[in-house]
Image (tube, rainbow, N blue to C red):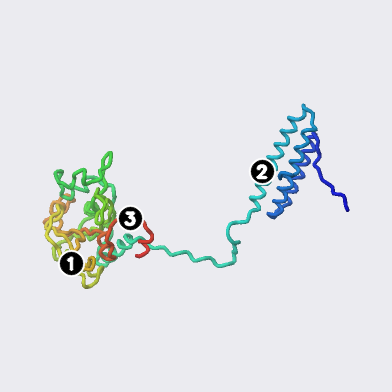
Amino acid sequence: MPRRVTLRAPMTTDLATIDRIETEALEALGQTAEEAGLEAWRIAWLGSKGKLKSLMAGMKDCSPEDRPAFGQRMNALKKSLEAAFKERKNQSAPAAGPPLDVTEPGDAAGQGRRHVLARTIDEVVDVFSRMGFTVAQGPEVEDEYHNFIALNMPESHPAREPGDNFFLEGGGMLRTQTSTVQIRVMENTPPPIRVISPGRVYRPDTHDATHYSMFHQVEGLWVDQGVTLVDLKATLIQFARTYFGPDADVRMRPSFFPFTEPSAEVDIRMPVRGKMQWVELGGCGMVDPNVFKAVGYDPEVWTGYAFGLGIERIAMRKYGIPDIRWLFENDARFLRQF
């Protein structure tokens, strides 16, 4: 029977020998790639019965004055081999998931879509553009002149109360209607003009199913000689029947707005929870002479009408959305329906 031979690591205080052993261990590790080979290297060098453990046993053969140097070098060797093993194992770890085949056709990217409000604005603008209106834009941070004074709202008007507006430190405010754009257009454009101004507006309303502190409007303005209330009504009926369908039923109820005279509320008859009801879409009227005077138009020469419609109200009526808050919660499950 062959005699069993037990390999023992050299027990020596020669630090140069330890350096040689470290080089030998790192070279062996560098030539190991497979996971099984790495585990075998760890057991052989760092295991409880490995070469490093046997080498540490040589401390008992060291003289007392050599033991501190020997111990420090062995600790450094252990840290070096452990760090090298960890790095090598990370390098050899298989990538997560199946291997990548660069020749295989990729998955088609999902097609996105515009938000239902952005799409509604585009649709509304398209209808009015076909009636000869051009689009005008203006700032959302406004001054009180364009938001109130030029629109015939004196300082005592209740709509100017702090609780009904977002006033900013240092002056200015968030506009409460896009009528401010109409004022800016008239200040810089001689009549005749025919514009619509879609955009965001802000009012400190309590959030509920029909109110939100930020919403969208589209306001229209037509100024020319001989414009009448008949033109206004015809425009709104044409819009409603083009957008909601030829059977859309529209009515105008007398109302009051400081910047139009006479003024009216615009309602459309729509099915609501299975029952036909009149639903308000916005307000309208003939431009008040004081507004013309504020922008330098002669009210004896020029007449015009203005209207303002809520984009959220239009979208909610067309798509049967019962709660305005759903439009701003960014729930993809809801938005994918439109």
- Percent position (x, y) of residue 230? 14, 66
> Residue at the spot x=74%, y=41% of the render?
53
Residues marked 3 and 1 touching at CB (< 8 Å): no
The foreground one among 108 and 133 is 108
- Mark toward the start of the polypeptide (2 vs 3): 2
Q: Earlier in the sequence, mark 3 or mark 1?
A: 1
Q: Is residue 1 left or right of residue 179?
A: right
Residue type beneath disc 2? Ala
Amino acid at the residue labelled 3: Phe
Question: Foreground mark, 1 or 2?
Answer: 2
* SS at mark 1 in the image: strand
| Mark 2 crowd level (few <14, some 14–19, many ≥20, 10 Å Cα) | few
Determine crowd level at label 1: few under 14, some 14-19, many 20+ residues with C-alpha closer than 10 A: many
Name the image quarter holding residue 277.
Answer: bottom left
Residue with the mark numbered 1:
250
User: Is 54 positioned to the left or the right of 116 in the image?
Assistant: right
Q: Which structural element holds mark 3?
A: helix
The residue that appears at 22% across and 70% down in the rendered structure is 241
Mark sitting on residue 328: 3
Choose between 302 and 166: the one closer to the eye.
166
* In the image: residue 202, left or right of residue 267: right
Q: Position of residue 264 (x, y in %)?
A: 14, 59
Residue type marked 1: Val
Which residue is identified by label 2? 83
Mark 1 and mark 2 residues within 8 Å of each other at the beta carbon = no
Q: Give neighbour class at mark 3: few <14, some 14-19, many 20+ (Cα, 10 Å).
A: few
Lateral position of residue 23 relative to residue 106, left or right: right
Residue drawn at x 25%, y 60% is 313
Q: Is residue 98 above or below residue 4?
A: below
